[in-house]
Amino acid sequence: MFKFFVQAKSPNTSARAGILEIPHGKIHSPFFMPIGTTGFVKTLTPDELKSLGAEIILANTYHLYLRPGDKNIKKFGGLHKWMGWNGPILTDSGGYQIFSLYEGNTSHQNKSDFKTHVRVHDSGVEFKSHIDGSIHFLTPRDVIKIQNNIGADIIMALDECIPHHADKKYAARAMKRTHDWALQCKKAHKNPRQALFPIIQGGMYKNLRIESAKFISDLDLPGIAIGGLSVGETKKQMYEILETIMPILPKNKPIYLMGVGSPEDLLEAIDRGVDMFDCVMPTRLARHGSFWTLTGRRNIKNSKYRLDQKPLMENCGCYTCQKFTRSYLRHLFTEHETLGLRLMTIHNLHFLLNLMRDARTAITKGKFRQFKKAFLAKFKAHAVRRRRTPQ
Amino acid sequence: MFKFFVQAKSPNTSARAGILEIPHGKIHSPFFMPIGTTGFVKTLTPDELKSLGAEIILANTYHLYLRPGDKNIKKFGGLHKWMGWNGPILTDSGGYQIFSLYEGNTSHQNKSDFKTHVRVHDSGVEFKSHIDGSIHFLTPRDVIKIQNNIGADIIMALDECIPHHADKKYAARAMKRTHDWALQCKKAHKNPRQALFPIIQGGMYKNLRIESAKFISDLDLPGIAIGGLSVGETKKQMYEILETIMPILPKNKPIYLMGVGSPEDLLEAIDRGVDMFDCVMPTRLARHGSFWTLTGRRNIKNSKYRLDQKPLMENCGCYTCQKFTRSYLRHLFTEHETLGLRLMTIHNLHFLLNLMRDARTAITKGKFRQFKKAFLAKFKAHAVRRRRTPQ
């Protein structure tokens, strides 16, 4: 029902290529999961995701619990059937969304307001719905039950996600709670068709991260997630934490770095042994007109593309680049036409999924380091504050 | 380059099935043209339009002249190439849009404001751009030149479109101007790869309509359009005007009723001998959540569809109905997801294009009257003020 094999490793790196077999299909690692928070990947049909070569998508427990409701999804025959995607799905537990949604919402920027909307207890989390302000209380057991109803192939334990600037005391307490909740989730989870992944926390503190990595590994669940990164820390901090914990983690389980998705971060994390990723970046950037090329990020709304008859990226095999020019795509944005959002989403997802396929090929050929170096030599990383935010 | 054959007629009706051959392909009449005002059919790719069986689409001279500019389109290799649609295209002259855009725009409702934005002279029309307020003056000759640059297969003469409540004196003057402009357009048009259609006007006055029908027919151009209907008059008025002019028109040319597109109006107009139609209705209704079924119009936002596991319409062959339930489509609308707009657009266009294919089959079998009667017996027409409005 749930198997993971490492097929190849590349010399002078921890990069590895593997296969993850789960109820709805086989996934080739390392892989990136497009985000379908509320039961859809924005602008795309499941058929388009298939054509892009997506092998698994991510949905969100918090959002689906609120709307349409996990019990309704169960009545509909589960999320796969309802949304028309018959490949693998992972559901994030919603812990991150509960803790960040108000912070991420510009109308709720101040801390005091944030505190009135979320209360963490040792037994679970109390929060106000971002939709209608109704009050909800969820225990780790509830979160498992909800994910059982939704029916994803991989489900996540409830965790407490903290800001990158949290002090050590706060980080330690949140980590402890995350560990207790992971145990409770393990106990509550009974469905053999769903694999539960617990989440490593510990903020920016290396000794906490090591403690958490050991605790989470000892739970001996089918996979391991690394949470609480991509929350505003620097790239250097993130890479250092990966370097601290990766050697401790079991080698026979898939490692999932949550919320990470810029091209350079993917390659650096693969280099350090990570197998799974998700991020809103490719889809959200696309809807704001940003697109990736091998030399870096561009924005189609730039007036210099007004008469440009080239595709978004030379030699790109995506549908958008095969069919449309920059001048036409810019026109769609100028006219506020939703087809533009879709065509850009297709390009960015293709770019990232293709980067993962190329990375995998390089690993199987034993040439990942060379591949990464060549890619990063051309690609100008965008100076953006990385942040895993609810879509 | 431009041929029209009538292949079949149905007894006790003027309904006819034909073939229109134009540079970019063959079109089976009667046919409906999805609207791609500004160089795209909202929410859809050209490939999706092909799968829906659309054989021709409509774009708008006024909009394309303003953005991206007809000279730019010429540089891009013409509209077909730029937008990635290699089938036939018709461009409306933009007369209707110039005259109605301010009236249709809620921020410019009052007449005096309308008058300040459009001035009609015998030599052409002066108007303010709805985009940036810049002033433009276009003669009939300019409108042809612009359409030559855009490169559609069928182009339209400039006409003066008047409100349905215009008095007879005003209607007569606008008709006279429309005739003069049609003559000037004919004189200015030289490109043998584009067929020019002149437009019958005359308001709601039968003798003016007869005069206009005769004048326009005598121009002996490859097709004939009927304008100034679907501007707020009753269905009865529209059908009576069709009955007045259709017997006068040549039998060997395609007749195009502009701006008409509700299912019941299409069948009534086909019954009276019309071959071509366009309307924003299927696409615009879709974006507001409305969808057609064989029993009439519904709206997906209705709360009764929240848990509904049926497709939009039973036995519908469209992509949307094959793949998704009403509950899922309603969810997409609740979440303001653009995929919902696309999936509804696909259903409504399929419904209308399929209705036209079924009408054609019924004509070739000599059973159009029975077909129309059976359809209208079940289909509850929506009590909506028909109005051809800029998209």
Image: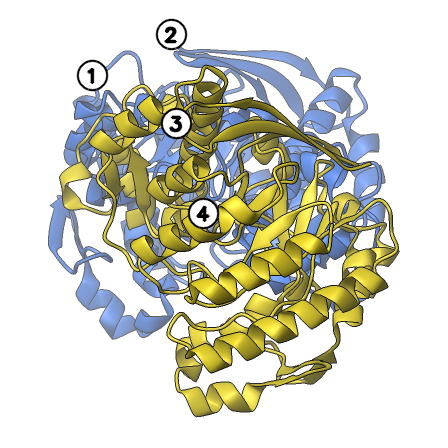
Chain colours: A blue, B yellow
Which label number is shown at residue A1?
2
Q: Residue type at mark 3: give it.
A: Asn
Q: Position of residue B61 (x, y in %)?
A: 68, 62
Q: Secondary structure at mark 3?
A: loop
Q: Position of residue A80 (x, y in %)?
A: 34, 23
Q: Chain of mark 3?
A: B
Q: Residue type at mark 2: give it.
A: Met
B47 vs B301: above or below? above
Dot 2 crowding, Cα within 10 Å, few <14, some 14–19, many 20+ = few
Q: Is circle 3 on the same chain as circle 2?
A: no
Q: Chain of mark 2?
A: A
A4 vs A197: above or below? above
**Marks 2,1: beta carbons within 8 A:** no
* Viewer-nearest residue: A101 or A364: A101
Q: CA distance from mark 1 to mark 4?
A: 47 Å
Q: Chain of mark 4?
A: B
Q: Position of residue B89 (x, y in %)?
A: 68, 44
